[in-house]
Image: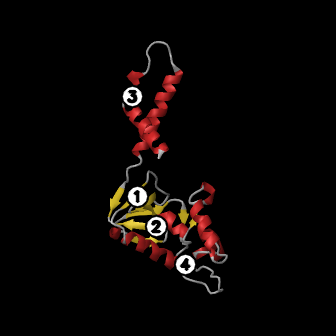
Amino acid sequence: MKQTLASVALAFAASSSFATDLPLGEADPTSARIFLELHSIQQLAGVMNPFLSVPGEAFRIVEGDSLALGNLRIRLVGIEAPEMAQRCNALNGVPWECAAESEDRMRDILRSAEQVECFSNDRNSYGDYVASCTADGEDVAARLVAEGLAWPDEERGYYLPELAAAQAEGLGIWQAETPTPFEWRMQQK
């Protein structure tokens, strides 16, 4: 909360600052650096507006980590759900339809949401938006990881608390050793 308030205060300060506010005459590198940092924070604060805000029922689920609205495709940032044809290992040794379960769970989360907001400023090589989406304020990707229905991007530190909880409880993909989607794709070649 304190960090958010500080960011808002700095963004406000940046929005009320102009280049003409910098001291004239003798160069003041400290003031110039502060001005540029405040300006950068102001620009970053503008990215926080969702590029999409619609009722959850409007979406079509493409895969457990991808959704679509008309021709607009969105890939959830920071996770990878099981591949469409991938089956996961269960504790009892019988494979289960983890891809279908991941897709069904995403569908349930979105369909029950009054408002889904997606935040992005990036696209992948396929032209899809790479986004973080919330369903009634809850991070959809975090929920899928917490329920053991998606792998987080551990290298970038995404959803590590949710990962730890799902692993500790042996939920979903964590009930038995299961190849990641990348490993599974390599096995299919």
Q: How far apart are the two marked residues, 4 and 2, measured between alpha carbons? A: 15 Å
How many C-alpha atoms fall within 10 Å of the one at disc 4: few (<14), some, or many (≥20)?
many
Circle nearer the viewer, 4 or 2: 4
Q: Are marks 3 and 2 in contact (CB under 8 Å)?
A: no
Q: Residue 181 sits in which quadrant?
A: bottom right
| Upstream in sequence: badge 2 or badge 1 | 2
Query: Mark 4 or mark 1, which has the lower sequence index?
Result: 4
Q: Which of the two labelled residues, at mark 3 and mark 2, occupies the earlier sequence position?
A: 3
Residue 118 to residue 89: above or below:
above
| Point 41% across, 48% down: residue | 48
Q: Which residue is mark 4?
A: 98
Q: Does residue 70 lie above or below 101 as drawn? A: above
Is label 2 or label 1 in front? 1
Please name whichever residue, 181 or 138, is drawn nearer the observer in this view of the structure.
138
> What residue is pinned by disc 3?
17
Relative side of 102 to 113, left or right: right
Q: What's the CA distance linking mark 4 and mark 1?
A: 25 Å
Query: Which circle, 3 or 2, is nearer the viewer?
Result: 3
Is residue 106 among the parts visible in the rendering?
yes
- What secondary structure is found at the residue carrying circle 2? strand
From the viewer's perspective, is 25 left or right of 167?
left
Q: Nearer the viewer, residue 61 or 135?
A: 135
Q: For marks 4 and 3, give the CA distance.
A: 52 Å
Tell me, yes or no, whether the two marked residues, 1 and 3, touch with CB atoms within 8 Å.
Answer: no
Which amino acid is tagged 3? Ser
Identify the element where label 4 is drawn. Answer: helix
